[in-house]
Image (cartoon, coloured by chain):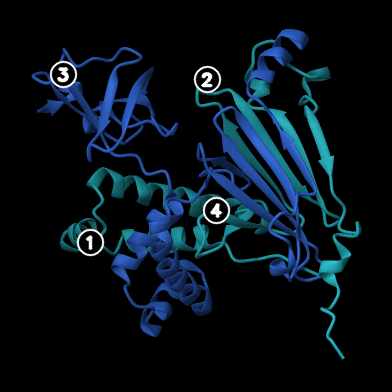
Amino acid sequence: MTPAVATPTAPTAAGTPVISRDGRLRGKLLGGRRPCKEKGCTGTTVSIRWENNQVTEPCDTAMTWDPNNQRLTATTPTDDTLAALARIVLAHYPEALVSHAQNLSLHTGLTEDQVSQALLAAQEIAGSHQSGPSSLERHQTDPATYTIRPETSAYVEVHDPNRPGHGYSVSIHADSDGPGIEVWPLTPNPNRIPDDEEPLDRLDWDFSILNTILENHY
Amino acid sequence: MPKNTPTTDTLTNLARLLSALQGELNTYQLEKLMKDTNLELETTDELFERAKTITAVANEASTPQAGTSTLERKLEEVDIYDLAGQRAVWIGVESPDHPGRGFDLRINDSGDGPVIDVWMMDDMDIPGVDGPDGAPLDPIASYAFAFTDHLTPDLDEPEETNA
């Protein structure tokens, strides 16, 4: 196999199928191309939309084109940054030792307690990975913006500052036809909510309404 | 006003650890890390880059709060999150059939209770779509819930005990 950039016959057209290097994900080229920003690299970044809806922009020098099998391969996308960072941290620091905390505190600006807490968190997050990936992925440069994974749910708890344990839980269900939003009471006694309890409110938004909005207003 | 909110930002803290770690790794350690995590070199490199970006965003924010994630995931649960107090979060829900189209949901807690706004995803990017004077468009819908509403009061009261 050869790097895609070095093979003139490597396809670049939008819609070209791509497979992840681990063979688990399929995607398609979106057609967007621009010079790679990596210092000294003469390659071109290409946009790929994967079947999990994630978009990545790898450099084509890191992709491989197999002309015999007409197979374009790209780096496996990682769409759960929190869990992936936890795995790496845990692999390098399998135990939350005091010496690690002291050393890392010097290099990170975190307190030793914060470092210890993060190392322990890495263990718990990596341990929960069997439950699947996080349903929300934070935007790298915007700490307030997240994307929900298709066909998953996210439960966002909003806490009352004056009544600890109380507040609201906002459930977001990323269904295939549009998001469903439920608002539930948050209470210190969740076991006392009957199983057949209805949410305080349920809002359903169908993607098809976007067409209507665009046609009517724009 | 009392603070109720989680101040931990595990994602950013892990990113800080990884950023500090990157310069310390020799080739052998990097290879061992890839083997132990079953991650490819490109993926590992990308994750180190993400860690650097997240750390830089936190370091360069105008205020410490502005650089921290507004949601903190429960460590043992992959789908339950706490919203940091008096912050807002945007959650994009994209149509699987029309990439780039969908809804942006905003949950804003100003301390009185959540306000949920529904917006059309990336509406500012749609040609010809602008509010008055280029201002952002209004949300499609807005729902407000006050903490002072009596939420199922029977759940909040102590359990009755038989005398």
Residue drawn at point x = 74 percent, y = 36 percent: A203
The amino acid type, in three-letter code, at marker 1 is Asp
In the rendered structure, find residue B98 and report the number of the disc placed on it. Answer: 2
Rendering colour (chain B): cyan
Are the residues flagged by discs 1 and 2 from a single subunit?
yes
Using residue A48 as the reference point, say whether residue A179 is left or right of it.
right
Label 3 element class: loop
Q: Secondary structure at mark 2?
A: loop
Q: Secondary structure at mark 4?
A: loop
Q: Does A122 appear above or below A40?
A: below
Q: Amino acid at mark 4?
A: Asp
Amino acid type, label 2: His
Q: Which residue is mark 4?
A: B79
Q: CA distance from mark 3 to mark 4?
A: 38 Å
What's the colour of chain A in the image?
blue
Chain at tag 3: A
Could you tell me how far apart the alpha carbons at marks 4 and 1 are, in whole angstroms? 26 Å
Tags 1 and 2 in contact by the CB under 8 Å rule?
A: no
